[in-house]
Image (cartoon, rainbow, N blue to C red):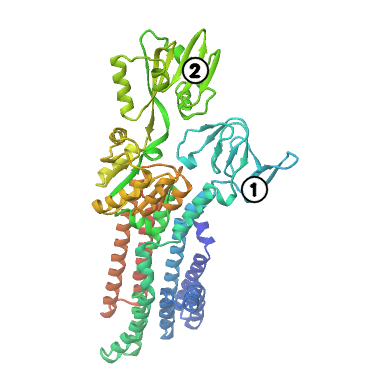
Amino acid sequence: MNNLKKWLENQGMRNTIICAVLIVAGIILQSQGLENVAIPVFIVAFLIGGYYSAKNGIEELIYDKHLNVDVLMILAAIGASVIGYWMEGALLIFIFSLAEAMETMANEKSRNAISELMNLTPDEARRYNDAGEVEVIPTSELKIGDKVQVPRGETIPIDGKLISSNAVINEASVTGESVPVEKVTSEDVVGGTINEGNRIDIEVTVKDSDTLFSKIIRLVDEAQSSPSKTASFIESIEDTYVKVVLIGVPLFIAFAYFVLDWGWTESFYRGMVLLTVASPCALVASATPATLSAISNAARNGMIFKGGQTIDNVNALDAIIFDKTGTLTVGQPAVTDVYYLDNVDNTHVDEVIKSAESGSTHPIATAILEYLTETSLIELDNVEDITGKGFLIKHNGSEWKVGKHSYVLTESNIQLTEDVQRVVTEKESTGNTVIFVSRDNELQAFYALEDVVKENAKIAIEKLNNMGIQTIMVTGDNENTGKHIAKQVGIKEVHANKMPDEKSSILDELKEKYGNVGMVGDGVNDAPALAKASTGFAMGSGTDIAMETADVVLIKDDLTMIPFSIGLSKKMKRIIVANVIFAISVIVLLIVANLFQAINLPIGVIGHEGSTILVILNGLRLLMYRD
C-alpha cells in the first residue's frame, strides 16, 4: 500500500498510468473497428504521457541550449503518428514516460538519506520565555542563548549546553554507540540525540543552521548534486550524441529509400525505430542512480561523501595514513593497570586516591575516577592541589602524595626496587603515563594510564590490510609509543616523532612511494594533509576545519567505514561499467535488428526502455550494499 501511495503521489507516474489506461481503451476501440474514435484517444494518451518529457526537453533546449533524449522520444512518437502508427506512437510515449517516472522515483529513493537525517531533529522546541514559562515554537526560531526544556524520552531539538543537573543521553544517532552516556552540567549536547533521563534544560549555543545535523544535511545535499566523473562524462556527451542521432536518422531514411528501395512509409518507419533505439536513455541512466544510491547508503551508515567524484576516487587508494591521537585512539587517558606494593591495603589506597581526585577536572583525575567507580569516598583531613605536580594529602596523621615521578619519588628520594623499576620502565616506554602514590615517603602503588585504542580501529586496519592497502601511522609521539599502538591495531608502517607541520611533507613522500594515499585525521594540524591527500577522511568528533577540508566525514567516528567506503566505491564502479556495457550493447543490437527489419517500433521501445529500467534497478542495488 505504501509503495502504491508513493507511485500515485508522483505526478509523472500518475500521468503514465492515465496514459496506459487510454492506450488500452484505444486498442479496444481499434479492435471493434472504431478507428476514428481510437485515434483521438491515442492522441490524448500521447499528450498526457508525454507532457513532462516534452516540457523538460523544450525547456532544456530553450534555456540551456542542450538537446536531451526527451527530444528524440517526442520526435519518434510524432513521426510514428504522422505515418499512421498512432498506437505505436502512444505506446512509445507510455514506456518512455514509465522509465522516466521510475528513474525519478529511484533518484528520490536514493536521496532519502536527507529526509531520514532531517527527521532525527524535531520541528518544534519547548523554549522558556521571559516569564519563565514554557512555550512551543519552531526549532528554526531558536536563538543562541535561549533556554530550552527537553522532557524525558524526547529528542533534543538543537545543539546546546546542559544547564540543569546531570543527564542521560542516547547519542546513537551521532556516535552509533547504543549505550547512553551521562552528561554533567555545562557539557555539550547534540541536537537529534535523545534524553533518556529526567527532564533537562539546555542553553542553545548555535543557530539552527549551524547545528551538527544541519551541516550533515548540507554535505549530503551537496554530495548528491555533485556527479561522479563517469556520470559527468556521460552527461557531457549527451548533447553531441543527440545531435548525431538527429542528423543520422534523416540520412538513414534517405539511404533506405534511395539505396535499399524500401519504400517511403517503410523507410520513414524504420527511421522512427532507429530514432527510438539509438536514444542514449539507458546510457545516461547508467551512472547517476548508482552514484546517488552509493552516497545515500554511506550517509545512512554515518559517512558523508562530498560528491560523486570523491566516491569515485576512494577505490583507487593504495595506502592510508592514520593520525594516532583521537583517530586510532580515544584521545583521553584511561587506567589500564594498577600495581600495589606488598603489605599495602589496596582498598584504602583506592579510597584515598578517589577522595582526593574527586574535586579535580583534569583528564588524568577523570580517568582514575572512572576506574574507581565502585570505590567508596572517605573524609580526608586536607587535600592540597600542587599545580603541575599532583596532590598533597593529610589523612589520619599520614602524609600522602599523588603525582608523577619527579614529585612523588624524586622529591622524597624514594628508590624503586629492581622489579618495580622494570615494570615502570616498560610502561613508560610504551607511552603510558604513570601516577605514583606514596604514604609517609613510602611507595604504596602506581597507576598506569594510556590513551586506549578505539574498539573499531583493529577491525578497520585488518580489513584494509586484507584489501592490500598499506596502512601507515604518523604521530608526534616517540617511536616506542607509536610502534606499541601500531602493533595493537595491526598497522604496518610507523613514522614517529613528527611535528604537525611535517605531516604534509610526509604525505608527499608517501605519494611518490605508493601512489594514491588517503589521510585520516581529526585536528587542526591534520587539515593541510587532509586537503593534500588523494582522499581525506575526517573524524566527526574532530575540529570544524578538519571536517571542512576533508573529502569524507566519518560522522560516527567509526573507522570500519573506511574499508566499507572502499568496498562500496569498487562495487559502484563495477555496476556503472556493467551498466554502460549493457546499455551500449542493447543499442547496437537494436540498431542492427532494425537494419535487418527484424523488429517493429513497439519491440524497439520495449527493448530500449526496458534496458533503461534495468540499469536504474541495477544502480539501486547499492542502497542495500553491505560489507
The residue that appears at 45% across and 19% down in the rendered structure is 402
Task: Name the quadrant containing residue 243.
Answer: bottom left
Secondary structure of the residue carrying numbered label 1 = loop
Is residue 551 visible in this depiction of the protein?
A: yes
Q: In this view, does 441 lie above or below 9?
A: above
Q: Find residue 278 and report its horizontal and vertical position in percent.
A: 33, 75
Circle 1 is placed at which residue position?
A: 143
Question: Looking at the image, is mark 2 or mark 1 earlier in the sequence?
Answer: 1
Q: Farthest residue to the bottom: give it.
A: 258
The residue that appears at 42% across and 79% down in the rendered structure is 77
Amino acid type, callout 2: Leu
Inter-mark Cα distance, 2 to 1: 46 Å
Question: How crowded is the residue under tag 2: few (<14 C-alpha within 10 Å), some, or many (20+)?
Answer: some
Q: Find residue 434 and report its horizontal and vertical position in percent.
A: 38, 24
Q: Is residue 575 left or right of residue 32?
A: left
Q: Find residue 272 and report its horizontal and vertical position in percent.
A: 37, 81
Question: How crowded is the residue under tag 1: few (<14 C-alpha within 10 Å), some, or many (20+)?
Answer: some
Q: Is residue 613 above or below residue 320?
A: below
Circle 2 is placed at which residue position?
A: 392
